[in-house]
Image (cartoon, rainbow, N blue to C red):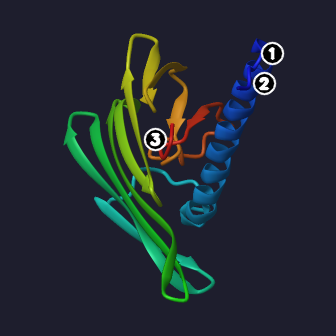
Amino acid sequence: MMYLNPLTMNSLKQYRNKTKMFRKFLTAMVAATFLVPLLPANAVDKIPDQTSLTYSIERKGSKIGTHSVSYDFTGENQIAVDIEARVRIKMAFITVYKLDHSSQELWKSGELVKMTSETQRNSSYEEVDLRAADDHYVVETDGETVLAPRDLVPSSFTKTDFWIDEGTKDFMLLDTLSG
């Protein structure tokens, strides 16, 4: 029988936490690799007149998925945003990477009020739930609750004035795939 001293157990916990953080970072970087080409190159003056935008995601000239953003102007200064992404990477007819992502955001007067997202990445499943509180956001993911500042911007970049060119913006980015 092997006994672990508390120092060894703390080291194991730190290693597991670092490994988990590294996996999340790596996953975010892989997702960003696919989504970065979808971002507009120039600032715009307003939200597009279209209520729905759909992009093809390509890798080495071949379509590997789609990314759709739908806007619903639901009321006075209120916008509901639905986001869907589907990616399949195959090698020799075998799917080696699969991503299904769905996110809903509610914006009121340019402020994010609520966001929910569900992501199925290969065999892992993650949910993110965000809601506005008095002077902060409450973000729930993987059974953890975190308080975040109100300058938080979802990585979907659907903030209504985000692409309007007003100079440098300071903000904190929330990964909508995994929190």
Q: Which mark is residue 7?
A: 1
Considering depth in this image, is 143 or 85 the residue closer to the camera?
Answer: 143
Q: Farthest left residue?
A: 75
Question: What residue type is disc 1 on?
Answer: Leu
Question: What residue type is disc 2 on?
Answer: Ser
Considering depth in this image, is 10 or 17 the residue closer to the camera?
Answer: 10
For image coordinates 65% across by 31% down, the residue present is 170
Task: Kindly report the distance in space between the C-alpha atoms of the residues bearing marks 1 and 2.
Answer: 6 Å
Question: What residue type is disc 3 on?
Answer: Lys
* Mark 2, residue position: 11
Task: Kindly report the distance in space between the C-alpha atoms of the residues bearing marks 3 and 2.
Answer: 41 Å
Judged from the image, the secondary structure of the residue bearing numbered disc 3 is loop
Is residue 141 among what the camera can see? yes
Nearer mark to the viewer, of 3 and 2: 2
* Mark 3, residue position: 159
The local crowd at label 3, few if under 14, some if 14 to 19, many if 20 or more residues have their Cα within 10 Å, is: many
**Percent x, y of residue 34:** 58, 65
Q: Which mark is residue 172?
A: none
For image coordinates 38% across by 15% down, the residue present is 133
Nearer mark to the viewer, of 1 and 3: 1
